[in-house]
Image (spheres, rainbow, N blue to C red):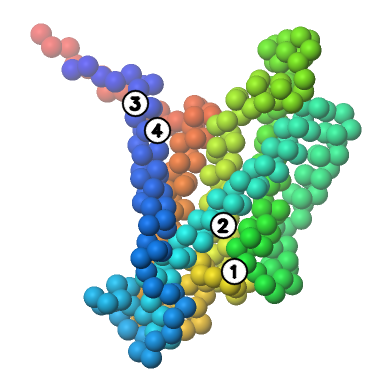
Amino acid sequence: MAQLSPRRRGRRRLGGKLVAGLSITGAIVAFGLIAPPFVGDPFLIRPIGITPPSGEFWLGTTQKGQDIFAQLAVSTTNSLLIGVSVGILSLVLAAFFGIVGAYLGRWLDEGFSLITNIALVIPGLPLIIVISSYVEDRGLAVVALILAFTSWAGGARVLRAVTLSLRSRDYVSAARVAGERSWRIIAVEILPNLLPILASSFVFGVVSAILAEAGLSYLGLGVSSDYTWGRMLYEAQMGSALRSGAWWWFVPPGLLIALLGAALSLINFALDEIVNPKLRAPRRVRPVKATA
């Protein structure tokens, strides 16, 4: 019987992680895009109190009679918006301070490195809590900006280290000697080699942002003008859902947070293995018995 080569088995394991991660992520994204237009007002208060799931309310209602399924649909959209926005903003900041500074070098690199090191030293979570506590009207954009400006420094350090290695390569030196402009060398010669790292940084930024927003909202410091997964958990806590046994109030948002976090982590692991093939776990090759 023919056996797969180690490289092909590694690709199969890598593909399994990507397929699982992308499938779960795609299902959650589809729910967040399709469901909101077909549900009712998540803020609408009804005089029915807290009720379990039924044919009319698929995930039951809160103690104010609000439709939990409608809240979950809107919360999914808003949480994904925050995650993607923070992922893009933090990636742009990390690329600017990491790639541009490392390639141009000299005083610009020293200045950017100083800013990055200061941002790394400042504790992120306490800073986010302090800033959020002083901002009264915390919309989606405000929370996304706060999270983005406190989460880019780590990615900038990684991109700077890789760019310093790439700028000394022969093809980059040849482009520089040929008189190519700096911005073109960065865009054509350096950025394509950084795409796996940029993709991994983006996925990690999305995961971190969604978890951070959920943590802030659970403390009552998240988005105040709309529903997110974190705000649903916060209201469930304030409404004593766990004590009263109203599992349908806090399980759905918590489950979606866990599923999306696991799915994006699988995607991130797969991207890390693409960047560094040494991370792929080797499998033992079973000896083939000779047949007479």
The secondary structure type at the circle numbered 2 is: helix
Type of amino acid under label 1: Val
Q: Give the distance between the C-alpha atoms of the residues marked 2 and 4, in whole angstroms.
A: 28 Å
In which quadrant will I find the C terminus?
Answer: top left
- Distance from the alpha carbon under mark 1 to that under mark 3: 45 Å
Describe residue 56's horizontal placement relative to residue 86 as left or right.
left
Three-letter code for the amino acid on which mark 2 is drawn: Ile
Q: Nearer the viewer, mark 1 or mark 3?
A: 1
Which amino acid type is marked by label 4? Leu
The numbered dot on residue 82 is 2
- The residue sitting at 41% across, 64% down in the picture is 36
Asked whether the beta carbons under mark 2 and mark 4 sit within 8 Å of each other, the answer is: no
The residues tagged by marks 3 and 2 sit, at their Cα atoms, a distance apart of 37 Å
Amino acid residing under circle 3? Arg
Label ID, residue 223: 1
Residue topped by disc 3: 9
Name the residue beneath numbered marker 4: 14
Q: Is residue 254 visible?
A: no
Nearest the viewer among 77 and 99 is 77
Q: Is residue 80 left or right of residue 285?
A: right
Q: Residue at x 31, y 23 (%)?
A: 285
Dot 3: element: helix
Residue 253, position as x, y percentages in the image: 43, 66
Mark 3 or 2: the one toward you:
2
Which numbered disc, 1 or 4, marks the residue that appears first in the sequence? 4
| Image position, residue 112 (x, y; %) | 81, 39
SS label for mark 1: loop
Residue pushed farthest left? 292
